[in-house]
Amino acid sequence: MVLDTPAALIHGLDSEERVIFALDGSLPAVLAEALAKVGRAELQGQQVVVHGKDGHQVPLVSEAVSLLST
């Protein structure tokens, strides 16, 4: 049995985070480049899926929302 905090147990799984958002139009090249720096971004129809490994200082969702709000 393994005992640790929930955050430490999740981090130990070496899991991947995903952020999915819908587009209203096309994905601007500048945004695509910025998202590629925080994870692997792929376009699926009108949705963008950003994949990243857990373990960043800032959660992937926070980085993606920050980029979307600028």
Image (cartoon, grey):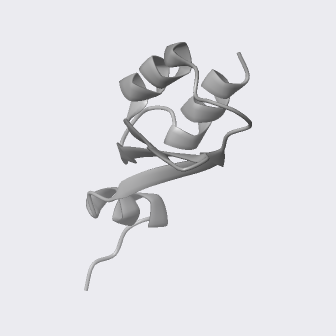
Question: Residue 24 appears at what percent x and percent y?
Answer: 74, 37
Q: Is 15 situated above or below 62?
A: below
Question: Residue 7 appears at what percent x and percent y?
Answer: 45, 59
Residue ID at (52%, 13%): 30
In the rendered image, the quadrant that contains the C terminus is top right
Please name whichever residue, 57 or 65, is drawn nearer the observer in this view of the structure.
Answer: 65
Instruction: Place residue 57 in its image quadrant.
Output: top left
Lateral position of residue 58 relative to residue 65, left or right: left
Instruction: Place residue 8 in its image quadrant.
Output: bottom left
Residue ID at (50%, 40%): 60
Please name whichever residue, 45 or 59, is drawn nearer the observer in this view of the structure.
Answer: 45
Lateral position of residue 61 relative to residue 4, left or right: right
Question: Residue 26 appears at what percent x and percent y?
Answer: 62, 30
Residue ID at (56%, 30%): 63
In the rendered image, the quadrant that contains the N terminus is bottom left
Question: Residue 54 appears at what percent x and percent y?
Answer: 37, 48
Instruction: Place residue 40 in its image quadrant.
Output: top left
